[in-house]
Amino acid sequence: MLTEGMENATARSVLVVDDEEVMREFLFDVLEDFAVEKASDGDEAIARLKEKQFDLIITDMKMPRVSGEEVVKFARETYPDAKIIIISGYSSLSSVGNALGYGVCAFLSKPFTIKQLRLEVEKSLSQKIEKKSGTPGGQQHG
């Protein structure tokens, strides 16, 4: 079941990055109307980002070898307008602050609900349109 506004999602591409297979599969299933690709760690995510641009990146922060932080930094350098949602089981105030400092759209603390995920995905993808129509300097009218 989709929420209002997600029915045109078929053309949107999403990269899901998490070292936990059950979380990758959960996100894949919830985002079934998107073109979802999965990466099991930061190395694999960066390799996929070198191949193509995604409309949205959803990444865990704590992963072996290459962290979600490195994925976010690479995505920001390569695709400055990339929409990114961070998910983490370690949601201290400083980690949320750091995530927002990376210019991410949202930070979801595990466990989160399907409704929370869908809401953040919708908001994040709509920001892309709003940003392009904004005035110089990032200021919005209103």
Image: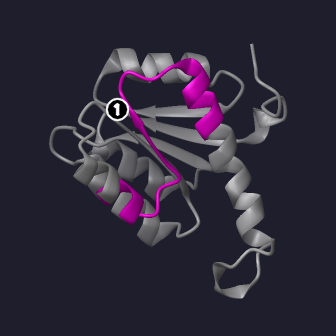
**Which residues are drawn in magenta?**
98-120
Residue 36 versus residue 13 in the image, above or below: above
Left or right of residue 27: residue 137: right
Which residue ends up furthest to the front in the rendered image? 142
x 46%, y 17%: residue:
25
Residue 119 versus residue 13 in the image, above or below: above
Query: Which quadrant of the view contains residue 23?
Result: top left
Residue 100 versus residue 110 in the image, above or below: below
Residue 122, image x, y percentages: 69, 40
Left or right of residue 135: residue 75: left
Looking at the figure, which quarter contains the N terminus?
top right
Residue 68, image x, y percentages: 30, 47
Was residue 136 drawn as part of the magenta stretch in this picture? no
Q: Which one is in front, 72 or 88?
A: 88
Was residue 109 drawn as part of the magenta stretch in this picture? yes
Residue 119, image x, y percentages: 64, 34
x 73%, y 51%: residue:
126
Residue 59, image x, y percentages: 40, 41
Q: Which one is in front, 111 or 17?
A: 111
